[in-house]
Image (cartoon, helix red, strand yellow):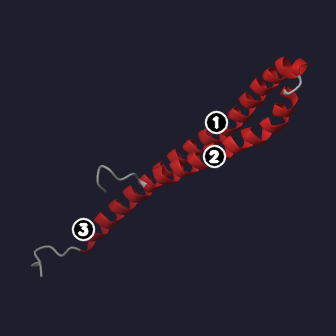
């Protein structure tokens, strides 16, 4: 793998993060629609601003949790794949040594 290529687990992790961010933005836009209507009433502007802050914080927290879980899963899968690769490499090396014939000429 060249230095500019990302491991597949990173590509998948990043794609999921981008998807989560897109869904979060859509969620916030939809949730904001009724607040925009309420803001049209002068006496509700102040309370609506407070509700929007709480709402944005709650929505943002949920999606950040999803991104954190995604990062943890990516780390776990990377470690699992690395362990599997290490065991396969060791097994293949042991098998090659076991089947090697001492003194045999290479063909």
Give residue 22's mark: 2
Element marked by disc 3: helix
Work out whether residue 80 can be spotted: no
Work out whether residue 74 can be spotted: yes
Local packing at callout 2 (Cα closer than 10 Å; few below 14, some 14-19, many 20+) is few
Q: Position of residue 99 (x, y in %)?
A: 25, 75
Give the number of callouts.
3
Q: Residue at x 55, y 42 (%)?
A: 71
In front here: 95 or 51?
Answer: 51
Q: Where is residue 51, by image quadrant?
A: top right
Q: Position of residue 86 (x, y in %)?
A: 37, 56
Closer to viewer: mark 1 or mark 2: 2
Question: For this view, does 44 lie left or right of residue 86?
Answer: right
Element marked by disc 2: helix
In front here: 103 or 42?
Answer: 42
How far is mark 2 from mark 3, CA to CA? 52 Å
Q: Residue at x 29, y 54 (%)?
A: 2
Q: Position of residue 77 (x, y in %)?
A: 51, 52
Question: For this view, does 6 lie left or right of residue 39?
Answer: left
In front here: 47 or 93?
Answer: 47
- Whichever of labels 1 and 2 marks the residue nearer the N terminus, that label is 2
- Whichever of labels 3 and 1 marks the residue nearer the N terminus, that label is 1
Q: Which residue is mark 1?
A: 64
Question: For this view, does 103 lie left or right of residue 56?
Answer: left
Question: For this view, does 5 lie left or right of residue 70?
Answer: left
In front here: 13 or 88?
Answer: 13
Element marked by disc 1: helix
Give residue 28's mark: none
Q: Which residue is mark 3?
A: 97
């Amino acid at each position: 793998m060249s230095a500019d290529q990302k491991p597949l687990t990173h590509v998948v992790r990043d794609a999921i993060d981008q998807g989560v961010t897109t869904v979060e933005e859509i969620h916030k836009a939809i949730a904001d629609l009724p607040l925009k209507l309420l803001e049209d009433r002068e006496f509700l502007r102040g309370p609506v601003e407070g509700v929007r802050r709480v709402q944005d914080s709650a929505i943002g927290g949920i999606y950040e949790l999803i991104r954190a879980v995604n990062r943890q899963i990516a780390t776990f899968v990377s470690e699992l794949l690395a362990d599997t690769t290490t065991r396969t490499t060791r097994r293949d090396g042991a098998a090659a040594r076991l089947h090697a014939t001492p003194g045999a000429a290479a063909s």
